[in-house]
Image: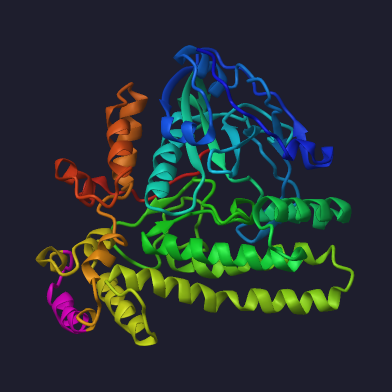
């Protein structure tokens, strides 16, 4: 059987200044280690035999209808503007219209050098590929907008980082790879024609009801506010919320030094390169506003009446904190069983979070066990929970179905950092059983799955992951 991918490429029809045509670099001995059959079915992809799929998803064979390219963008990295970034190790094969009518990109990560590699080798090693595969698919199962993983392939080659590591390629699927930085690069260069063309393209592809640049800004704001609130609700820390990692579609993108919290603390940072906590858990809403302001600055450049555009864009951006707070309250109220929260419910939530931080409670397990004796076991001083739970019980007694609300808001399983690291270590030694087990369990995060209860356990002291790293 020959693999068939129904490409329908729109980005490749944009002017050449938006990208560089780039064929993936072949690898020596590709071997398919994971393939997402459910996602392939949604995309209308007909799988081929294993050797052929390994060749395609490693980049050795360019499938019929693909128009491979590397996208151009710039961005603020930790607050500092870099005028040209772009896909340094990723190649967009093309787009497909899924069976649900949604257009999506199919991209190879780790497919070799591009004109934007900036001295890098364009490759990826196995660890970050498996991390993104598992974590992005877990996010999808949690119901959080995200890029998806279609395939993972070993290359049969090594890549050199601090040591020689096994190479791999990830096939990533996204509603698009348009970023805040995609707009920034044309605005910074004064290429207003390209900026207008990109704005029209983004509106047509993602927000067809948006009215012009400010309509696009509003739509992105709303999508990002919903996304960030949902990150917060599962204790997710992106790690590198640079503008080149901020998708205008409202999807989670670029799983580098990401992590899910174990013990709750608002200042938690895992990223090895975030030395000052810019992208700490509690800072993510503020950074989302900052990133939106950079998008606004770029979009304004194409508007003739700059003064009016600045005034309108300022109002749109300034409305985001209140919107984020409303989204956050909706998410966290559901986590404690409240379907339609009022203003006083915010105090109830924040009181619990304060106690959790002080008493080193596990984020996921505490919320999952609310109302159960196991919840108080999460606190170093269980009386801190006892004195909160009385008021909470009085409040949820006014709700029609608090248990049902909590059950669908609080997962039992998340990709815990120590389990992800153990999975990677095993795979490097040729054992993919932990990878497949973790992926399977995380595909049903809201189910108890008692046979896999060990995956809900926080790390022992010697298992704690202190830092996570970029996937380069």
Tell me the quarter of the image containing the C terminus. Answer: top right
Quarter-wise, where is residue 250 in the image?
bottom right
Across the whole image, how many numbered discs are drawn on residues? Answer: 0
Q: Is residue 137 something one can see in this rendering? A: yes
Farthest residue, direction bottom = 344
Residue shown at 66% from the left, 49% from the top: 178
Q: Position of residue 197 (x, y in %)?
A: 82, 51
Q: Which residues are magenta?
A: 378-394
Q: Is residue 370 magenta?
A: no
Q: Position of residue 288 (x, y in %)?
A: 57, 65
Vertical relation: 98 (above or below) 330: above
Q: Is residue 380 magenta?
A: yes
Looking at the image, residue 296 sits to the left or right of residue 280; the answer is: right
Q: Position of residue 339 (x, y in %)?
A: 33, 73
Residue shown at 49% from the left, 26% from the top: 168
Q: Position of residue 304 (x, y in %)?
A: 89, 69
Prevailing SS of the magenta stretch: helix
Looking at the image, residue 451 sits to the left or right of residue 47; the answer is: left
Colour logic: rainbow
Residue shown at 62% from the left, 45% from the top: 176
């Amino acid at each position: 059987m020959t693999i068939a991918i129904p490409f329908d490429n729109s980005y490749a029809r944009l002017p050449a200044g938006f990208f560089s045509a780039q064929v993936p670099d072949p690898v020596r001995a590709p071997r398919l280690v994971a393939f997402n059959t459910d996602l392939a079915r949604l995309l209308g992809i007909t799988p081929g035999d294993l050797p052929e799929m390994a060749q395609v998803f490693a980049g050795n064979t360019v499938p019929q209808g693909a128009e491979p390219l590397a996208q151009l963008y710039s961005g603020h990295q930790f607050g500092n503007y870099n005028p040209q970034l772009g896909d340094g190790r990723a190649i967009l094969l093309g787009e497909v219209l899924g069976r649900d009518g949604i257009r999506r990109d199919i991209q190879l990560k780790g497919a070799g050098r591009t004109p934007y590699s900036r001295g890098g080798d364009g490759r990826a090693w196995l660890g970050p590929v498996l991390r993104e595969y598992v974590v992005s698919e877990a996010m999808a199962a949690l119901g959080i907008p995200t890029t998806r993983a279609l395939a993972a392939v070993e290359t049969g080659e090594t890549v050199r980082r601090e040591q020689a590591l096994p190479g791999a390629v990830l096939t990533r699927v996204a509603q698009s790879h348009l970023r805040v930085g995609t707009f920034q690069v044309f605005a910074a260069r004064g290429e207003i024609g390209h900026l207008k063309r990109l704005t029209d393209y983004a509106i047509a592809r993602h927000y067809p009801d948006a009215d012009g640049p400010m309509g696009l800004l509003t739509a992105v704001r709303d999508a990002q506010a919903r996304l960030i609130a949902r990150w917060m609700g599962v204790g997710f820390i992106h790690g590198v919320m640079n503008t080149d990692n901020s998708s205008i579609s409202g999807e989670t993108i670029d799983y580098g030094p990401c992590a899910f919290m174990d013990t709750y603390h608002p200042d938690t940072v895992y990223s090895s390169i975030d030395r000052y906590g810019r992208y700490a858990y509690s800072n993510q809403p503020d950074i989302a506003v900052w990133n939106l302001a950079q998008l606004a600055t770029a979009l304004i450049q194409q508007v003739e009446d700059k003064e009016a555009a600045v005034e309108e864009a300022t109002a749109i951006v300034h409305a985001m904190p209140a919107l984020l707070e409303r989204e956050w309250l909706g998410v966290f109220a559901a986590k404690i069983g409240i379907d339609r929260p009022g203003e006083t419910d915010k105090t109830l939530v924040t009181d619990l979070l304060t106690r959790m931080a002080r008493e080193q409670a596990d984020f996921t397990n505490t919320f999952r066990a609310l109302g159960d004796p196991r919840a108080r076991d999460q606190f170093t001083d269980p009386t801190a929970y006892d004195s909160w739970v009385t008021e909470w019980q009085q409040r949820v007694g006014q709700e029609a179905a608090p248990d049902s609300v909590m059950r669908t808001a609080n997962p039992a399983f998340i990709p815990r950092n120590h389990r992800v690291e153990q999975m990677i270590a095993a795979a490097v030694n040729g054992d993919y059983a932990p990878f497949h087990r973790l992926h399977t369990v995380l595909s049903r995060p809201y189910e108890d799955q008692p046979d896999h209860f060990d995956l809900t356990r926080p790390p022992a002291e010697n298992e704690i992951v202190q830092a996570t790293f970029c996937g380069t």
